[in-house]
Image (cartoon, rainbow, N blue to C red):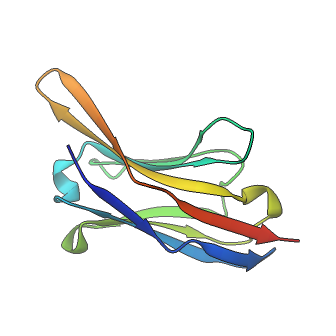
């Protein structure tokens, strides 16, 4: 299992930028995949971006070209750089990590960080 701690959320005006950080309790090289999800009030949690150990990235269509996921193994941290933020990006953002243990994938979640974009 991996402990994850998110930070970097806050209140920003539309068009602004934020960078979220997710600090992991182990080397991100040892983690099969990490990602960011978000959940707005009254909505289901949705994928924002993922990053695999092979450096493959995947983005939701709604954030392509605006958000970038990246990792810094020296700091055991994954980032989500967000530009051109929109009010509809308002949500609690969660970091997750998938670790392969034998034939099982164990998923861990952080506690979440609130992002609020004002119009």
- Residue 4 against residue 97 in the figure, above or below: below
Taking depth in this image into account, of 53 and 18 the one nearest to the observer is 18
Occupied quadrant, residue 26: bottom left
Instruction: Specify the farthest residue to the left.
Output: 102
Occupied quadrant, residue 3: bottom left
Give the side of residue 17 with respect to residue 47, left or right: right
Residue 72 on image: x %, y %: 29, 70
The mark total stands at 0
Residue sitting at 57 percent across and 71 percent down? Answer: 9
Residue sitting at 49 percent across and 57 percent down? Answer: 112
Give the side of residue 18 with respect to residue 98, left or right: right
Residue 116 on image: x %, y %: 71, 67
Residue sitting at 65 percent across and 54 percent down? Answer: 64
Q: The C terminus is located in which quarter?
A: bottom right
Give the side of residue 5 with respect to residue 18, left or right: left
Give the side of residue 15 with respect to residue 98, left or right: right
Residue sitting at 62 percent across and 75 percent down? Answer: 10
Taking depth in this image into account, of 96 and 3 the one nearest to the observer is 3
Residue 109 on image: x %, y %: 38, 46
Occupied quadrant, residue 6: bottom left
- Residue 101 against residue 4 in the figure, above or below: above
Q: The N terminus is located in which quarter?
A: top left
Instruction: Specify the farthest residue to the top.
Output: 103
Instruction: Specify the farthest residue to the right.
Output: 119
Residue 107 on image: x %, y %: 32, 37
Taking depth in this image into account, of 67 and 46 the one nearest to the observer is 46
């Amino acid at each position: 299992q991996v402990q994850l701690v998110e930070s970097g959320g806050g209140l920003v005006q539309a068009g602004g930028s934020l960078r979220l950080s997710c600090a992991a309790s182990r080397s991100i090289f040892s983690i099969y995949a990490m990602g960011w999800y978000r959940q707005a009030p009254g909505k289901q949690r949705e994928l924002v971006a993922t990053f695999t150990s092979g450096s493959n990235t995947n983005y939701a269509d709604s954030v392509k070209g605006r958000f970038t996921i990246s990792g810094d193994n020296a700091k055991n941290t994954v980032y989500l750089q967000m530009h051109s933020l929109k009010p509809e990006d308002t949500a609690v953002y969660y970091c997750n990590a998938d670790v392969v243990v034998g034939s099982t994938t164990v998923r861990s979640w952080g506690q979440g960080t609130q992002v609020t974009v004002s119009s």
